Every structure is written in structure tokens, then in C-alpha cells.
Image: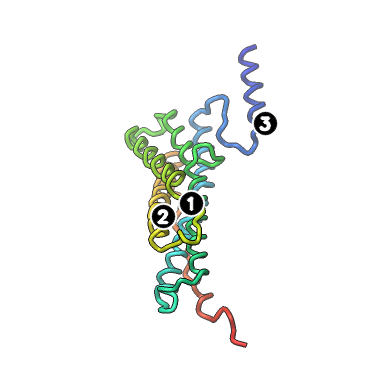
Amino acid sequence: MVIRRLFLYSAFVTAETPNSSVHYFLMLNEKQFRDRATRELREIGKLVQALATDRVLYRKLESDVIAANAELAHSSNPYLFMIRGSYTDAAIMRLRRLFAPDATLSLRRLIGQFSDYPEMLHDKLTGKEMAHDLGEIDKLGKILKEQLDPHFSNHERTPAALDAANRELDRAIDLLCDCVKRYYWIVSDAYIDVDPIATDNALAIFQKPWIEPK
């Protein structure tokens, strides 16, 4: 009777949370966990790859368009402040969701569950290495949550303020890329590509005037 009640309650929880991949009343066996972790890491990988791609685009805009144009390099044009601030704001919010342990897709929570399957980690990752990864995720997650304001006001969109924030964002993106690759390899024995998507022609839109003379 007790076992039947546990089974029914587990089925109820699963039915009530169809979009959640994290609330399991009964612990998964290793194969089930591998399958779920592989699916979640693929989804997280897509988000991380998008962040890495946007970072490349932003850097190209700064180096190949703004810095290369004497009229823009030292300009206080509000459009430049808006573009820079918008990139930083958006990156902070996207990263905070990935670092949050209670998010629907959370790399932090997923990695924490690996310790329940020590045989899976054998010869691939030590407990010390996993603890280091979790510590780095927690540290950067705290910085994203407590020290980086996701809503820069106009007077805070200075090059110095944005550069400081973007350095922390770069650390967070690099850590996510590294962890997604490592833990995907552990659960699937395969490689996942989270490198930036090729953006060779992305700056072509700047080769012609945006406002044609009348």
C-alpha cells in the first residue's frame, strides 16, 4: 500500500509539472539520469552558444565599426550608450537564469545532481573537480545577482562601468561553455558544440549608409 501511494504521488507530481525537468519524487536510475541530463545540456548548450555568438557580434561592432570610425570612437551619441547598455543588460539577465538553481533549465542544479551517480563519474571527474566547478558557478552567480545591476541607467552607461560588467560576463560565459562541454561528455561520451556560430557577413549592413541622402 505504501509503495502504491508513493507511485501514485510521483505520477501526480509529474503530471502537475509537465514543463519541469527537475522535480522527481523518486530518484532516477543512471540511464534515466543520463538521458535527462543529455537533453537538458543540449538545451542549455543552445542558450550558451547564443550568448557566445552575441558576444562575438558585440565585440566586432566595437572593434570593426565603432573603434574604426573616428566620429564614433569617442562619441557620446545616445544610440551608442543604448546599444552598449542593452547588450550588457540582456546578457546579465540571460546568464542569471542559467546560474539560478531554481530555474527550469539550471546548469547549477544539474551538475549538483551528478554526485548521486558516482559510477558515472569514474575516471572522468573527481569529486574535487566537481566541487570546484560548483564553487565557481556559485561565485559568479552571486556576482550576477548581487553586484551587477541588470538595468543600467543612462549616467551609468559609461565605458568604464560597462567594461567592468562585461569582464564578469565574459568569465560567466566562458565557465558555462567549459562546463556544458565537460558534463555533456560525461553523460553521453560525445562532444557538444557551443562555440559561436559563424558571423562572417554580419557587419555587411554597416557598409552602406543607413539613411540615404534625400
Q: Is residue 93 above or below residue 55?
A: above
**Residue 30 drawn at (x, y percent):** 48, 30
Q: CA distance from mark 3 to mark 1?
A: 33 Å
Q: Is residue 85 above or below residue 105?
A: below
Residue 185 in sight: no
Q: Which residue is mark 3?
A: 15
Few, some or many residues within 10 Å of mark 1 (<14, 14–19, 20+): many
The residue located at (52%, 26%) in the rendering is 27
Q: Report the quarter where the N terminus lies.
A: top right
Q: Is residue 12 above or below residue 176?
A: above
The structure's colour scheme is rainbow
Element carrying mark 3: helix
Q: How many marks?
A: 3
Q: Tell us which disc is closer to us: 2 or 3.
A: 2
Q: Which residue is mark 2?
A: 165
Q: CA distance from mark 2 to mark 3?
A: 41 Å
Q: Nearer the viewer, residue 183 or 148?
A: 148
Residue 39 picture quarter: top right
Residue 183 in sight: yes
**Residue 193 drawn at (x, y percent):** 45, 53
Q: Tell us which disc is closer to us: 3 or 1.
A: 1
Going by the numbered disc 3, the residue's amino acid type is Ala
Few, some or many residues within 10 Å of mark 2 (<14, 14–19, 20+): many
Q: Which residue is mark 1?
A: 92
